[in-house]
Image (cartoon, rainbow, N blue to C red):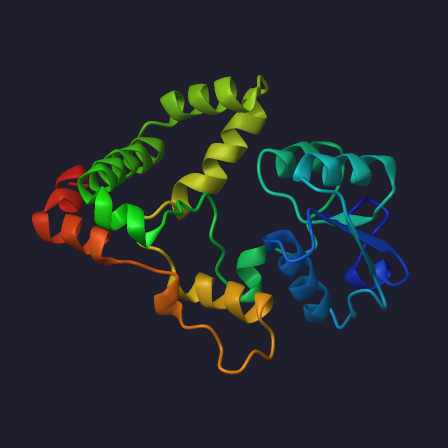
Amino acid sequence: MARAEIKQPSDLKGKKAGITTFGSTSDQIVRMALKHFNLEPNKDVALLSFGAQPEVFAALQSGAVQAGALSFPLYAKATKLGMRELVNFAELGAEDINGTVITTRSLIAQQRDTILRFLRAFTRGMYRYRTDKEFSKKVLGKYGKISDDETLEATWQDYAPTLQKTPRPSLKAIQFLLENQFPGKKPPPKLEQFVDTSLVEQLEKSGFIDSVNK
């Protein structure tokens, strides 16, 4: 997102962009977007770290930065304030991991049944979010402390189509993160070090995934 005075990407030259932390997804997204527009991060556009998205949003409001990566519901709030989208992350040809569930191999080995039960609940939750808009908006409003229905509607509309039926990690997204976190590392880290698909595959083979999404 960019402030209203930024009419086109080239207007960012000599300006500042806000990110959460260096090395974070927002950092990588902003760097990708700038390069997409033939702008060099920290040369043509200064990158400033604010710690979290609410602080990036506040910096955009105050004019401390002229652009920043925002997701819903802050994206919707920025739009209502007259800020404009310069680029959608999906248009950059990369995938992102949002709301990742992380554990250790030792916990999987020790409490596999508990983790499978969690994944069953997680799958049901994704299904209900996609199929029960009003309930999902109530949950978003309660825990996100959002009372504006327009913002709730826009947030639901943004996330619902992207929730997968199967909670399978995106290998493309993980590869994107690894390439940005370990640039030039030889040999590069292997995806298999960070992913265990056996749990999802077990749920698929048991027919559970299909039974939820029928």
Q: Quadrant of residue 77?
A: top right
Give me the residue at 83% from left, 52% from top.
6
Give the side of residue 84 with respect to residue 183, left or right. Answer: right
The C terminus - image quarter: top left
Measuring from the top left, give residue 92's x and y in whole percent: 57, 65
Q: Quadrant of residue 195?
A: bottom left
Measuring from the top left, give residue 199's x and y in whole percent: 22, 51
Give me the residue at 49% from left, 82% from top.
187
> Looking at this view, is 104 or 6 the one in front?
104
> Looking at this view, is 114 or 79 the one in front?
114
> Looking at this view, is 136 or 19 the one in front?
19
Give the side of residue 89 with respect to residue 114, left or right. Answer: right
Measuring from the top left, give residue 84's x and y in whole percent: 72, 46
Q: Residue furthest left?
A: 206
Q: Quadrant of residue 99?
A: top left
82 lies above or below 69: above
The answer to whether one can see residue 166 in this image is: no
> Looking at this view, is 123 or 197 the one in front?
197
Q: How many marks?
A: 0
The answer to whether one can see residue 173 in this image is: yes
27 lies above or below 132: below
Give me the residue at 59% from left, 20% from top.
148
Give me the residue at 15% from left, 52% from top.
202
Measuring from the top left, give residue 153's x and y in whole percent: 50, 29
